[in-house]
Image: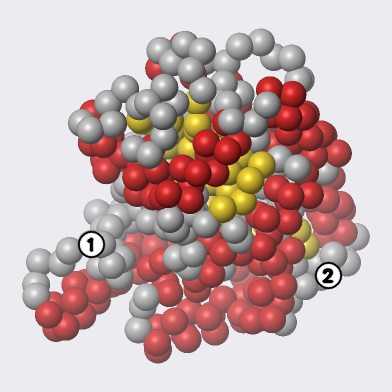
Amino acid sequence: MLLYGDIEHDARVRREASALIAAGHEVIIAVLASSPADATRRLDGARIVPVSPGRRGTRPGSKSPFMSRVRVPLVGTVGRMVAGLRWLVGYVTTYLAWRREAVRLLPPADVWHGHDFLGLLAAQSLRARHGGKLVYDSHELFGETVTASRMPWPARKLLAWIEGRAARNADVVITVNDAVAAELGRRFRVKPAVVMNCPPLRARDVGPGVMRAVLGLGDRQVVLHHGALQLGRGIEQLIAATALLPAEVAVVILGYGDRYEVAATAASTNLAGRLYVHPAVPVDELGSWVQDATIGVLPFQPATLNIKLSTPTKMFEYLERGVPMVACDFPSIRQIVEEADAGIICDTTRPDAIASAIRELLGEPPERLAARRFAARKAAETKYNWQAQADTLAMLYRKLEVGDKGAA
């Protein structure tokens, strides 16, 4: 597997690796080293090989001038162009150095599994050198990420051409839901298989969680948002909605990202005692935080096509822990939440609408809220669980072993 990024909080990559190990495969994951001194280690049974680009440059997660909220040091159009070009050159040269080192370091393999566009390009280079099968695991539409979608038109067209050519050259294309699969098929003439980002099922009766104890929330009603704290995730809208909720309701924001400080500042000033902000916790511990929530919230904004087509991991984590939710009105999300009777859909661009939906859900009779919790868990047990997704992944790999080229 090739991942140009950090493995610790990437639940999808870790679960897929564990599923393939359980199916009898040996898994090596090449990741972006945080420092040149990072050593090879084991994680979830997989061998993690940190690959250092050997230079200090622009890395994933760095603030980009293509993001509208990032200020650039120069003023005007020329300044933005210079800043954008400098950032892009730094990012590309750092990535290319990482890819060269990955090709140098990694031994031959039967399958090269590239995660997202940059993982795919590295996997393609390794197949060219060693042979084997190629898997493209598209976690989202690369061309619709915030940075890529705001690049100049010629750059976007070039990237789309490169991605399409590499995707059609893959033996299997995998993605996260039917909506993204349909869009990839339309753009690149491929037929992706779907492996959803569902968590594994755990026992219903797992005892008390840890969130209430760690944050000192007692028996208050708790509204939880967890995951990446980034542009388009509705952090600002949720903070504004918190001010409109009864003071006894506790809102918890759990995660990491460039909106963390915005949330932390609000939690320590005007919303102290009502808004609680905590860094991301390890994937293996997350369930014990989620289960303490009265309800979850999914306040995504229609900022990009990726977000509008998404079925976020946090939605499935709410279902698995039996946590009803207030969610954004995007087609795939609406379908799952309403099909499962697991919550309320609202216009998450409006803080007052978020607050109103939260009050409505928290104010339901205890037996109705209990029924929603049961229904959410039932949806996870019958359909939206990692065991079912792992079976799909294992089947795709069996097809590779017998030489059946193409996705499901």
Tell me which label, 1 or 2, sits earlier in the chain: 1
Q: Give the CA separation, mark 1 to mark 2.
A: 44 Å
Dot 1: what SS?
loop
Q: Residues within 10 Å of mark 2 (few under 14, many from 20)?
A: some
Residue 272 location, quadrant: top left
Please identify the quadrant where the C terminus is shown. bottom right
Residue 275 as seen in the image, left or right of residue 47: left
Percent coordinates x, y for residue 189 in the rendering: 72, 82
Residue 273 location, quadrant: top left
Residue 70, numbered label? 1
**Hey, what amino acid is under mark 2?**
Lys
Look at mark 2 in the image and give the residue it sits on. Answer: 405
Height in image: 203 above or below 113? Answer: above
Percent coordinates x, y for residue 316 in the rendering: 67, 41
- Specify the farthest residue to the bottom: 154
Percent coordinates x, y for residue 38 in the rendering: 38, 36
Tell me the mark number nearer the camera, choosing from 1 and 2.
Answer: 1
